[in-house]
Image: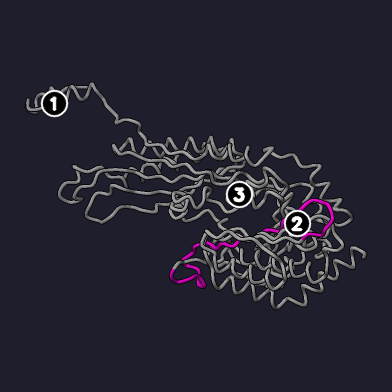
Amino acid sequence: MDKKILKDAIKESIERNKNEIIRIGDEIFRNPETGFKEFNTARIVMDKFTELGLKFTNIKEYPGVKATVDTGREGPTVAIVAELDSLVCSDHPECNKETGAVHACGHNAQVAAMLGAAIGIFEAGAASHLSGKIHFIAVPAEEYIEIAYRMQLREKGIIKYLGGKPELLRQGYFDDVDMCISIHASANRSKKITTRKSANGCIVKNIIYKGKSAHAGASPHAGVNALYAANLGLSAINSIRETFIDDEHIRVHPIITKGGEVVNAIPADVHIETFVRGKTLESMIKAAMKVDRAIVGGAYAMGAKVEIHDLPGYLPVAYDDTLRSIAKEVALDLVSEEEYGEGGHGFGSTDWGDISTIMPVLETSISGFAGAGHGADYRIDNPDTAYILSSKYLALMAVELLWDQAEKAKLVLNQFKPVFKSKQEYFDKVDRLFRKRVLPEKDYEDRDMQELLIESSGAGSKSMSFKF
C-alpha cells in the first residue's frame, strides 16, 4: 500500500468516529480526577481498548494502562502517551463541586486523541503495513499537586515517585519503549500545531515551620509564632528574586497550605509548598540553595524550627530534534504552513523531562482551547481541532515513524544522545533529591548576652544600662 493511501484511510476512519472521540473527551471532562485517583478515567480507556480488541495491562493499586499493537515485523517501538489526571481549580465554573477538580489543562483531550489514534490505526489495518510496535499508554499524575496525599501513598509503599511517568518507568511500563509521542492542549489561536524545544524542570519543597503554641491574647510572649516565621521566609524569597539569572528561567511560587489551628492560639505548625523551577538541573539546584537560606532565615528570626522536605519534581525537558523535524512533515499534511509553529523554551514543568533523559520524546501542542491554562476560564472552544486533529496527528506520526521498515524511527534512535545510559542511572540521580532536614540544626545561642542576662537578673533596672 502507498503511504499516502494508508494515511488517508486513517484520517477517514477518525472522521467516521468523530462523534465517538468527542464523546470520550467530553465524558472525561465532566468527570475529572486528580493524580493517582483516576480510576474512572482509566476504566474509560480500558473499555475502549477492549472494544477494539486490544489486550492491555493495568496497575491495580493506582491508574495506569498499556496496550500494544504488534506489527509482527522487527523494528523500534513507539508509545503514544496520554495523561489521565486533572487539576484543582475551585473557581472554574465546571469544576467538581466537592473536590474542585477540573480539566483546566486539557488532559481529557490527550486521552481522547490517544484513543482516536488507536481507532484510526486499528480500523485502517495500519499494523500490516508498518514495522515494530505501537504502544498506547495512559499515565496518571502528571500534575504535581496534592503532595501530602502522594506522600501518604509513598509511605505505604504504593508509589515511590510522586509523578506518573517516573512511577510507571519504575513499574517497567517503558522498558520496551524506544520513543514517545504525545499532544498537549494549546490556546494559541494563530497556530493549530506547534512543536516546542524544551521546558523547565523543578525541585519540589514541602516546608513545615515548627513553633510553640500559647494563648494569642493572654500570653503570646510564651509562644513561638510559626506563621510569622513562614511570612519572614516568604518575604526573604521575594527579596532574592532579583538575584536569579534571566536566562536560567527560575520560577519560585510558594503557597501556604496550613496557617495554624485556631485564631486564639499562636500558630505552631505551618506548612508551605513550593516549586523551584529552572532551565537546567544546575540552575534549579543553585536557586534551591538560595531559597533554603531564605526559609531558614525566617525560622532563625522567630526562634522556630523548620523542616525542609526536598522531593524530586521533574527534570528539565529536551524534546528530540529529529522527532520535531518529522512532526513538521506530519503537521504540514494536516494544516497549512501558516497554521504550524515552532516554539522555544517553556517555563512550566512536566514529567516528560524525566523520560526525555533516557529516550527521545516529543509533546506537540495542538490548539482548540481558550483561556489561561490552569485558570478558571480554560475551556475547549473547537472540539474538531482539540480532539480530531490531535487524533490524526498522533496516528500519522506513528505511521511516519514505522513506515518502510521503520527507517525514520531508526534515524531518531541513531541520533539520540541520552543523558543517562540506563533507567537505573536515572533513578540513582533522582533518588538523591529525596531529602529531609530540620533546621537550624541547633538553637541559636549568644553566650555573651546570656551571661549578661544572668548577671543582670534580679539586680534592678540600673544593671540593664550597659552599652553594646
**Reading the chain from its start, which is encountered first: label 2 or label 3?**
2
Determine whether 437 is above or below 405 in the image. above
Judge left or right: residue 110 versus residue 328.
left
Residue type, mark 3 in image: Phe
In percent of width and height, residue 446 lies at 26, 25
Magenta residues span: 70-98
In percent of width and height, residue 269 lies at 31, 48
Residue type, mark 2 in image: Gly
Q: Quadrant of the N terminus?
A: bottom right
Magenta-span inclusion, residue 445: no
Q: Residue at x 37, y 35 (%)?
A: 439
Answer whether residue 202 is visible to the viewer in this image: yes
**Reading the chain from its start, which is encountered first: label 2 or label 1?**
2
Q: CA distance from mark 2 to mark 3?
A: 18 Å
Determine the image quadrant of residue 81. Answer: bottom right
Which residue is more in the foreground, 417 or 272?
417
In percent of width and height, residue 114 lies at 69, 64
Answer whether residue 247 is visible to the viewer in this image: no
Q: CA distance from mark 1 to mark 3?
A: 56 Å
Secondary structure beneath label 1: helix
Determine whether 358 is above or below 110 in the image. above
Q: In the rendered structure, find residue 464 and report the number of the disc placed on it.
A: 1
Residue type, mark 1 in image: Met
Mark 1 and mark 2 in contact (Cβ < 8 Å)? no
In percent of width and height, residue 440 lies at 35, 33
Q: Residue at x 11, y 23 (%)?
A: 463
Give the labeled residue for mark 3.
347
Give the labeled residue for mark 2.
341
Mark 3 and mark 1 in contact (Cβ < 8 Å)? no
Callout in the foreground (2, 1): 2
10 Å crowding of disc 1: few (<14), some (14-19), many (20+): few
10 Å crowding of disc 2: few (<14), some (14-19), many (20+): some
